[in-house]
Image (cartoon, rainbow, N blue to C red):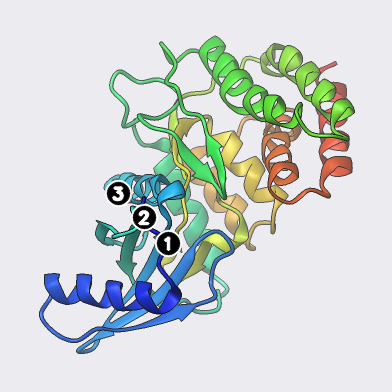
């Protein structure tokens, strides 16, 4: 495999790739906008692109991101940056060029617009055929590969099995090989066993397209007030899983909940299931960053108390 390119070599390579596709001289500057990949601003004749690059070892991350952005764009309810191009690099890596979007500080009505738009995404028909939980490929939460093996059907038992196996069990297995996580892994496995009790209130999850990594750093507002989301890890999942993650990291903007409830409703049992859904993302943070073990363990124990 070719040696990894230096920053200067990669910058020049990106300029040549863009020039070969679109006539003109592209000015490419490195950014410091992500902890998980190299990022760039590319400009030519008044046109600006946001470019991400990954080495060969993680090139599939960008392929999965482009796939997720296209899926969300096809839903037409929520704005995402348009995929401008996706290329292989000489070192075997990949470059993803996206529409450059200027983000503005959220105004007083942003939360309501965001809630209504996300509700429309969640209420839309599942883009998988036949309908089921999962996705047609794995994708990534940060550097953690997210398993998306599709369920055979779209019933409550199918969702419980999918979430237990493809979400909690996958991460518990990875944590089981780390020191200092024995109690957390054991608690996560107890939550998996208790999942059916969290759905004993008549709630019937349906496969909805979700962004999958919708913390407050992955949404924003355009100058005209339009909500926009980016950096997805999409799947067809229970919409409650999305909402629980949003509440965990960064909170929700004022006005979000009334607009979301008006457009999509919210089952009264959501609060019981929320800790189990949040546990998945806390387990991932233990994997990615460490230091979240106590919070994850407390979350697992809360899920078990609510399961009864």
Please say if the residues under marks 3 and 2 sit with CB atoms less than 8 Å apart: no
In this view, which residue lies farthest toward the left? Answer: 23
Depth order, front residue of 139/201: 139
Q: Disc 1 or disc 3, which is closer to the eye?
A: 1
- From the image, tell me which residue sits under label 3: 70
Depth order, front residue of 221/177: 177
Residue 170 location, x and y as percent?
62, 26
Residue at disc 1, secondary structure: loop
How many other residues sit within 10 Å of disc 2, few (<14), some (14-19) or many (≥20)? many
Q: Disc 1 or disc 2, which is closer to the eye?
A: 1
Residue 240's image quarter?
A: top right
Q: Which label number is shown at residue 93?
A: 2
Image point 44% across, 34% down: which residue?
Answer: 138
Depth order, front residue of 104/36: 36
Up the image or down, 118 lies above or below 168; here it is below
Residue at disc 2, secondary structure: loop
Q: Is residue 100 visible?
A: no
Residue 48 location, x and y as percent?
30, 80
In the rendered view of the protein, which quadrant contains the C terminus? Answer: top right
Determine the CA span between mark 3 and mark 2. 21 Å
Residue at disc 3, secondary structure: helix
Q: Disc 3 or disc 2, which is closer to the eye?
A: 2
Among numbered discs 1 and 2, the one appearing first in the sequence = 1
How many other residues sit within 10 Å of disc 1, few (<14), some (14-19) or many (≥20)? some
Image point 76% across, 26% down: which residue?
Answer: 176
Up the image or down, 51 lies above or below 279; here it is below
Q: Answer with left or right where residue 168 lies relative to residue 230.
A: right
Residue 103 location, x and y as percent?
47, 76
Up the image or down, 112 lies above or below 50; here it is above
Q: Which label number is shown at residue 4?
A: 1
Residue 241 location, x and y as percent?
60, 35
């Amino acid at each position: 495999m070719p040696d990894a390119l230096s920053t200067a070599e990669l910058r020049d390579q990106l300029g040549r790739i863009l020039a070969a596709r679109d006539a003109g001289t592209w000015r490419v500057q490195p950014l410091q906008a992500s902890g998980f990949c190299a990022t760039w601003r590319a400009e030519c004749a008044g046109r600006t692109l946001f470019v991400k690059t990954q080495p060969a070892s993680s090139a599939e991350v960008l392929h999965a991101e482009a796939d997720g952005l296209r899926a969300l764009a096809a839903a037409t309810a929520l704005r995402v940056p348009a995929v401008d191009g996706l290329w292989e690099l000489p070192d075997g890596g990949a470059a993803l060029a996206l529409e450059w979007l200027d983000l503005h500080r959220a105004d007083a009505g942003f939360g309501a617009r965001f809630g209504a738009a996300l509700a429309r995404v969640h209420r839309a028909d599942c883009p998988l055929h036949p309908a089921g939980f999962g996705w047609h490929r794995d994708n990534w939460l940060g550097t953690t590969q997210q398993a998306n093996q599709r369920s055979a059907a779209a019933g409550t038992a199918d969702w419980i099995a999918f979430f237990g196996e493809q979400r909690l069990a996958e991460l518990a297995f990875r944590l089981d090989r780390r020191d200092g996580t024995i109690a957390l892994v054991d608690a996560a496995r107890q939550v998996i066993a208790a999942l059916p009790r969290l759905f004993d209130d008549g709630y019937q999850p349906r496969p909805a397209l979700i962004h999958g990594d919708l913390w407050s750093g992955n949404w924003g507002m355009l100058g005209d007030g339009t909500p926009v989301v980016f950096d997805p890890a999409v799947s067809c999942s229970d919409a409650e899983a999305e909402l629980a993650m949003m509440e965990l990291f960064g909170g929700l903007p004022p006005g979000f909940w009334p607009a979301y409830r008006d457009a999509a409703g919210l089952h009264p049992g959501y609060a019981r299931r929320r800790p189990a859904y949040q546990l998945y993302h806390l387990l991932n943070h233990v994997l990615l960053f460490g230091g979240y073990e106590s919070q994850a363990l407390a979350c697992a124990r809360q899920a078990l108390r609510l399961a009864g």
